[in-house]
Amino acid sequence: MAKNVFTEENFKKLDQVIAEYKGKPGALMPVLHEAQKIFGCVALEVQKKISEGLNIPLAEIYGVATFYSQFSLEPKGDYVVGVCLGTACYVKGSQSIIDRVCKDLDLEVGKTSADGKFTVVATRCVGACGLAPVMTINEDVYGKIVADDVPGILAKY
């Protein structure tokens, strides 16, 4: 079962962040960044709290949170498995890698496992084109892999 990040303690931390930035120009981005650190995402209930605290319309907050790829509306797993689908990686077979990751973890792209351990994401260029195709797990980078490498890599986590 995924851990509950929406605790009273975390909302108190968010209140402190909102109080620190309230009334300052450009407060929304740093508050969203801090909220993402606290909760692992900026879910609707977090956005509502920010909206009330900063007196910014919820629609504006939602627009910013969905525009920038660093923000997630749902909690991510402990291990975020990213497979690059940029041109160099795609041409070298990254589709078969992401298909294998999804099959082995029994997850769809963009989803998190029920135990909160893994999230699968399709990424665009990670800047390691010379290592194509590339898969990342959090900060670890795996290059020049094939679909048959996936089970061994996932087993480390």
Image: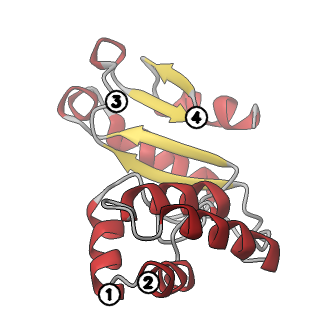
Residue nearest the observer in this picture, 147 or 13? 13
Residue at 29% in and 68% down: 64
N-terminal of the two: label 3 or label 2?
Answer: 2
Amino acid carrying label 4: it is Val
Where in the figure is residue 61, as x and y percent of width and height?
Answer: 34, 76
Residue highlighted by disc 2: 51
Secondary structure, mark 2, is helix
Amino acid carrying label 2: it is Ser
Secondary structure, mark 3, is loop
Tell me the distance, in whole angstroms, between the alpha carbons under discs 4 and 1. Answer: 44 Å
Where in the figure is residue 11, as x and y percent of width and height?
Answer: 70, 75
Q: Badges 4 and 3: C-beta atoms under 8 Å apart?
A: no
Tell me the distance, in whole angstroms, between the alpha carbons under discs 2 and 4. Answer: 42 Å
Residue at 54% in and 47% down: 101
N-terminal of the two: label 2 or label 1?
Answer: 2
Q: Residues within 10 Å of mark 1 (few under 14, many from 20)?
A: few
Q: Nearer the viewer, mark 3 or mark 1?
A: 1
